[in-house]
Image: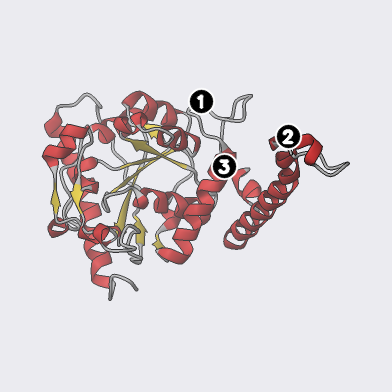
Amino acid sequence: MAHIPVSVSESQPPGRPLETLEDVAKGLAPRVRETLDAAEEQIDGFLSSVMGESFEERMARVDLHLGAGGVDAFGLDPKWAKYGFFAAAVLYRHYFRCEVTGIENAPRGRVLFIGNHSGQVPIDAAMIGTALFLEADPPRLIRSMVEKWTQTLPFVSTFFSRVGQVVGVPENARRLLESDQALMVFPEGAAGISKTYDRAYQLTDFGLGFMRLAIETKTPIVPVAVVGAEEQYISIGNLSGLAKLVGIPALPLIPQLFIPGGQLPLPTKYRIAFGAPMFFDGDPDDDDAVLEEKVWSVKTTIQQMLHEGLAKRKGIFF
């Protein structure tokens, strides 16, 4: 007997048309919304538990200058910052178990936080920023100067700007300080963050730019010492030739990355110390030799703070 083809529509039971992708999407939308709302509630609850107030209440105490689009002139968006602080606060409280001293030294108004840099990735900057937002009164939302090459990274450049990070050029730093913002600078730069473990807690050369900036804008400097970051990713070498080839400042050789689970930083205990504000005057256009003496005083202060922090700790993980 001849085969009579039956169309798909004819084979469907009456009253049950085929679902389209649009139908599926419409069905999933409420569930996705419920899931996102539940996640938002969990985030809000966690942040409130660690801050004693809601994120929005704490952010309202920060001096921000937002435009009509809800972002500031450098791209900071409090909505993005909320999720950034949530992730950072989890690490701060439960992974690195940060211990902070001297937070009362963080002044109101414009300020330059100058710290040691280490750990291969800038987790130290995130933990310092989290400490100042969670622990300081009033809370401070610091801006960090990021390397220009980070602007070439997809998504990363947008994320950095949305959570308050700023490309490290003098013009940006000056504008932030003149609007009484808090700025975090690591004068060691890429050389500090990518140092090998045999040079742990030994400060590399400091640039002079931050001192010229502090003098020009009459900004106090608060020295910051971080103990614990050096051990999170232990580098035994630097593939500098390959790094130049791919256009990045450094390419550290980190054995733990080849161990299952070693891609995560080691859960070292962070100790963050804020020193007393330091004030400098003079001419920002002074010769390098004059500025180097002032920079040396900041560098030696941080180095001494590192020595003190290392002497007090009894272990890397506790």
Query: How many other residues sit within 10 Å of disc 1, few (<14), some (14-19) or many (≥20)?
Result: few
* Residue 102 image label: none
Q: Is residue 136 visible in the rendered structure shown here?
A: no
SS of the residue under disc 2: loop
**Residue at x 19%, y 43% (from the top left corner):** 191
Q: Which residue occupies 65% across, 53% down?
A: 54
Query: Which residue lies most toward the bottom here?
Result: 314
Could you tell me if the residues under marks 3 and 1 are in contact, i.e. CB atoms within 8 Å? no
Q: Amino acid at mark 3?
A: Val
Q: Taking 195 as reference, is 217 left or right?
A: right
Instruction: Give the residue at mark 2.
Output: 5
- Local packing at callout 2 (Cα closer than 10 Å; few below 14, some 14-19, many 20+) is few
Mark 3, residue position: 62
Element class at badge 1 = loop
Q: Position of residue 144 (x, y in %)?
A: 38, 39
Task: Point out residue 7 in the picture as x, y percentages from the top left corner.
Answer: 75, 34
Badge 1 or badge 2: first in the primary sequence:
2
Residue 272 location, x and y as percent? 36, 59
The image quarter containing residue 241 is top left
Residue wearing tag 1: 73
Relative to 89, does residue 71 appear above or below in the rendering? above
Q: Amino acid at mark 1?
A: Ala
Residue 298: percent from the left, percent from the top? 24, 46
Q: Which is more N-terminal, label 2 or label 3?
A: 2
In the image, 24 versus 196, the foreground residue is 24
